Every structure is written in structure tokens, then in C-alpha cells.
Amino acid sequence: MDLRLWLRWSLRDLRARWLQVVAIALVIALGAGSYSGLTSVTRWRRISTDDGYQALRMYDLRVSLAENATVSQGMLVGAARAIPDAGRIDAASERLITDTQVDASTPEQAVLVPGAVYGLDLSGGEPAVNALYAAEGRLLDAADAGAPVAVLERHFAKHYDLPASGTVRLSGGRALEYVGQAMTPEFFVVTTEQGALLAEANFAAVFTSLQTAQEIAGRPGAVNDLVLTLHAGADRAAVQRELQDAIAARLPGIAAEVTTRDDDPSFRLNDRDIEGDQQIYDIFAVLIFAGAVGAAFNLTARLVEAQRREIGIAMTLGVPRWRIALRPTLVGAEIALLGVLFGIATGYALGQLMMVFVRDLQPLPAWHTPFQAGLFVAVAAIGFALPLIATAWPVWSAVRVPPIVAMQPAYRLARGGGLAPALRRLRLPGGTFLQMPVRNLVRAPRRALLTSVGIGAALAALVAFVGMIDSFVGTTDAGQREISGKSPDRLEVQLTGFLRADGPEVQAIARSPAVAATEPDLLVGGEIVGGKTDIELQLQFLNMDGAIWQPSLIEGRRDRAAPGIYLSELAAKDLGVGPGATVTLRHPRVDPGGGVTETETPLEVLGVHPHPFRFIAYIDINHADLLGPTGYTNFVQVQPAPGVSPSEVKRALFGLPGVSSIQRDADVATAFHDLLNQFVVILRVVEGAMLLIAALIAFNASSINIDERAREHATMFAFGVPVRRVVLMTMLENLVLGIAATAGGLLGGWFLLRLTLATRVKETLPDILIKPTISGETLAITVVLGVLVVALAPLAIVRRLQRMDVPSALKVME
């Protein structure tokens, strides 16, 4: 019966302040719900992605031959079967991968992008490793071996809304009928050297039989890639070493690299992205919970102060202090419980809403979204405990004072409190009604600080979250400006191999009526070794003073005579080097007999360029002898003729012999922008939650102020002060709070953004220099939320002021 009495009493307190209670419960719900919803999404991504890798038998090890190198079919498998731990190999599959240009145009749109043909071993009906999943149409089978039949990679086909079946044309005019759209583990996230990051709009993978791929490439019986899976528990590192040794021994003169699935750019990006997202959500959850705890603390402290007289009387009557503390503690517990119940519903709804967009952004063979009971229980426990803990201090402070002090009216206790004595001699501008809001704030600085911290925490999370998108967009724009230079329509033509720069294939490109100028270059892979860290590079040998395009420098000098290398800003930073330093470059070299080997050459760092991709590096074409015999090219820069569009140039060069792919540099940035715009839809969901948190905290502060200052407001009304003036004073007080909260939110968000980019994003995308950026739009949104919305919050309580019973509010009982 005693417990029922306390519960009824506490529920009466809740009803008396139901607006503030609901506001704080919603803040707790949004804090707990946002975290549990976002975390559910990352867990669903992890479960579904891992299931996809397992179901489609993602490779454990991969053998890749050097560019343009091939061996006879069976030689790579033979080398793998000859290693000491061959019994640990579960399955192996040889492939032939060649670059091409893909024309998937339909009557409604022109689709002409670079891509690659993947020749798969279909002798078992489907690839034994890296299998395909049919998203549309059908898959290939053994009957398709050698036939002009293919399937398209799903992300590319979905981006352009291509039909389930149709026809594509490859470089050289070869037509292939595609019978379906397929997913494969290597392309759960599309990221390639040709298409860059998130490149489904700019890269097409075409899967066909091994025999068909060999015929298209003009290399019958050739392969250049091997993928393997291992038995569970096998020592992957040991098998990798044995396989590297076997390739070197059985295939001398052939440069080959043995990598693991962890080295696959798509797998690595996907894996790191999931983990990175979760750690970012953890940081944001702390900020959101901080706002919720601050709001709960504020309400409980004011609730206790409003009951000081009752608490003093109870202590005078000898009621134990713990029993006196029970009532406000129950109020805090009931608010926390209400917030947790709202939070469970909010979190599940938010997670399901975000999954609508995530499924569209990242198609997988199957999505699994089980209810994360353990997560919700843990978040519910935290969401319940933190606000409850926040009530402990004001309750304990209230029951520790002498009864005579507790029974004094609140307005007498507040006289001269806070920072008011320190500012007594400071003359503020304006009249009484302009000075009162500021005086109110300095009388209770703790309350003002808690309110500002709650709003500022929500704004800091918003600034950091939106700032990440601004930073990605800024990085993309910087890369586009650097690549475009003075030739925004410049195209890059990838050749089928190393061809003579004065040969007929290159001359045919230069003589095309659609082309104004050409510059033959070289593009090969390389690596900086022996320093603070090893960095893989994409080496471009070009004319550093080229007429079509030349990279800009932020440090160093252009020197065509001196052999040297130009590194990206991020590579120079990671290596700890600058102009004048010497690095060791590992690169391929063609020997007089035609074999390709790797060699190491010390080179001076001549300059640093601003391209955001770490792996981009340049060497002047005058020093192409580093690669062996000179006079060859595999990469041609093309300037369109006046009045000719890049698309027309692509069509004009598409069927020429020797042309593998054609790409306009600006298309990469454009595709990235399109994908970011899709991601912003997800961002708006979180942004809306943070907006609501800030608005609720502001409303709650205004509502509590109205209750606490009822006597002051009633006195002003009794002397004829209109309601609108009281509301304006309250709005001015909120305006000061909003300005302080906005300033703190911007500073905290900037710090959090820099911290997130320097740690979590750096681990997820180590090859991209992403500089922290906050756009003008983000600043405007933050100011609107932190200043305008907070300042306008008192408008929601105008009706309460208009209905105030002035005589009752002025009544004082001693």
C-alpha cells in the first residue's frame, strides 16, 4: 500500500508537468532510438554481407599476373596443386580478365563506359570460386561455353535501368548477348582502377565463359588470374607464401602477385565501412545521450526545487531522507521508462526506414534484418539508467539541507544567486525588458549551461554528421578540378597493350576527325618501398609540360631533365617526405627478351601534387626508359575537336583497333556526386532526429522557465504588461541560449569531424585525402536549428500564459 501511494503521488507529479515529461521522454527516445536503429542497420549489413560472401564462395587467395601478361590455361592451377599444402585448397578457378569499352546503349539513352570482360571457367556449370547470383534474368552454364553470351554486373545495370537481357558491344565492335544481371563478391561495392570508388555509373563488368573471353581478347587458351578457396582452419598466410614461391619457380619471367581477400579493394572497403560506421554511431550516441541526460537533469532539479517546501516539512516531521528522496526518484524513473518504451519503437522504425535506402544503395543476394533483441535491451538499460542517475544529485542535494532552508520560498533563495553579484555593476544596454532575460540567465548559470549543452550536443552531432558529406563532396570537387584543369572534356584512351607510339593504332586515334590533339603516355602499377610505409601507386608517365593537360604542384619544381617522381599530398605525408627526398620505387621492367620483371629504382621526389588519391603518381615521359625499351604507349590523352562532345569522341574511337576503353575524367566525379546525393537521403533521416532533439530541449527549457517564473510573470501581468512582451522576453532569453549552444555545437562538431576523419575514415579509406569541410549550407542549417528554432520555441507556450490565473500565481503562504 505504501508503494502504491508513492507511485500515485509520483504519477500526479508527472501529470502536472506532462508536457515537459513527454518532451524529455521523446529526447531520451530519440537518443536511444537513433543509436539502436543505426546500430541495427550496421549489424544487418554485417550479417547479410557475410552471408553473401559465404553463399557465393568469395575467394581466400588470388593470383594476378602483371598487366598484359598471360600463361596457358592450366598452368596457374598446376602451380597451385604442386605446393606442399595443396590439400588445404578447397577449390580453384582460372580466369581471363581484359579491359574493354562497353556500349550498353538503349533507344532511350547512350551508355558508353570503360569496363572489363571476365572469362569464367564454366566446366562445372558455374564458377567454383566467386560464383554469380542472378538478380535479373538467368546465369551462365556449361552450355554457354564458347558462345557469344554474357551477363552484366548488377550495380552497373541497375544504375542505368537496363533491361534484364539485351545486347552490348565491346571494343573492336564485338557484340555479346547478355541474358541476365548478376552479383558477385568482388562487386558488392564497385571500386576499380578504371572506375575509381563507387563506380557503378562508370564501370561495367561483363561476365562470360573463359573460351569466349579468350576469343574476344585474341588469346586462345590464355589465362591471367586464379582464385582459390581454402578449407576451414587452413593457414592462409602459409599457403600464400607457398603459392608465391611456386609461381616464381614454375613461371620464371612472369610477374605475379598473390593476394588475400583482405587485399581486395571492394571487400576491404565494405568491411571497413561497416566497422567505421558503427564507431561513428557510437560517438554520435554519446552526444545525443548527453543532451537527453542534461534535459532529464534540468527537469528533475527544477522539480525538486519546486517541492522544496514539501521536502522541508517532511524532514521536520521526521520522515527518513531516503523516503523523501523516493518520490522525485520515482518521477525520474518513470520518465526514463517512458523514454525507453518510446525509444524501442523509434529505433525499430528508424532502422526499417533506413534499410529501404540501404537496400537500394547496396544490393546484396539477400538481406537479413532480424530484431536485435540484445542490442535493444542494452540500449534500453543505458537509456533508463543515465537519466535516473542524472536525478540523483539534485534529489540528494535537496534532502541534505536543513529543513528551515528547504521551507523558504524559491524566490527568496534565488535572490542574488548565480553570477548576478559579479555582474551587478555591469550596465547592460536597453531598458528593463531587455535586461531581464540576461539577468535571468546569470541568476541560474547552471541551468543555462545544461540547456545549452543539451542543444549544443545535438548540433555538434549534426555538424559532424553533415560535415562528413561536405568533406566527401569537397574532396571530389578538388579531385575534379585537378583532373580537369584547362581541359574539362579531356578523355583518356586505354589501349589493349603496350603499342608503338608511332604505330598505326595510335596514329588512327590522332587522325580521327573527332580529335583535336593527342599525347601518348604510359600507365603502369608501382610501389614505394623501404620507407615508413609501403604505398601502391598508379604511375603515369606523361609530359609534365603537356599542352592537353599537366598536373599542378603545391610543392617542388617541374624538371623534365632530372629523373624523379611527383607524389600526391597524402602519399608524401604518409611517407614523411617532401621535395628533395629520395624514395625507392618498385616497378615493372621489360627485358630485351620480352619478359616482365620487377625492379627497384631510387628516385628523387621532385614535387607534390594536390590530387586527393594517394596512389596517383607522375613521372615525366622523358624517363620512360625506367620501364625498358622506349617509344611505347598504353594510354593516350585525347582533346576533342572543337564542337565535338566527349560522347561523340567515344563513339568515333570505340571501334578502332587497339582501343580497350575510353573514359572522360570528369565522369568519375559526376558519378560520385550522384551516389552521394542518394546517401544524403539517409542522412536526412538522422538529421531530422537531431533537429527534433534540439527543438524538444528548447521547448522543454521554455516550458520549465514558464512554470518556475509564474510568480514573476503574474506580477508583470498584474501591472499591465501584455503577454506578447513576456513572450518576447522569453524568446530573447532563448535567443541568447541558442547563440551559445550554436557556437558550442559548431566548435564541438568541427572537432568531432576532424577526429572522425583522422581516425575512423582514415582507416576505412586510407587512399583518399579527405580534408574536413563544413559547407555554407551546413552552417546555415545549424544556425537555423540552434538560433531560430530555439528562439521560437516559447511560441508553443503562449496559450498557457494567456490562461494563467494571476491571483493564484501571486498567492504566497508562509
Image (spheres, helix red, strand yellow):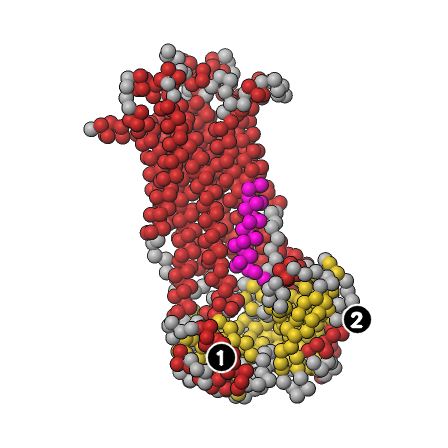
Q: Which residues are magenta?
A: 746-767
Q: Is residue 571 visible?
A: yes
Q: Which residue is mark 1?
A: 243
| Residue type indicated by callout 1 | Leu
Identify the residue at image location x=62%, y=82%: 596
Circle 2 residue: 561
Dividing the picture into quadrants, the one containing residue 603 is bottom right
The amino acid beneath tag 2 is Ala
Residue 809 lies in quadrant: top left
Q: Quadrant of the N terminus?
A: top left
Q: Is residue 498 magenta?
A: no
Residue sitting nearer the eye, 701 or 725: 701
User: Residue 785 location in percent, x, y?
Assistant: 53, 38
Q: Quadrant of residue 669?
A: bottom right
Q: Residue at x 48, y 79 (%)?
A: 242
Local crowd size for mark 2, using a 10 Å CA cut-off: few (<14), some (14–19), many (≥20) = few
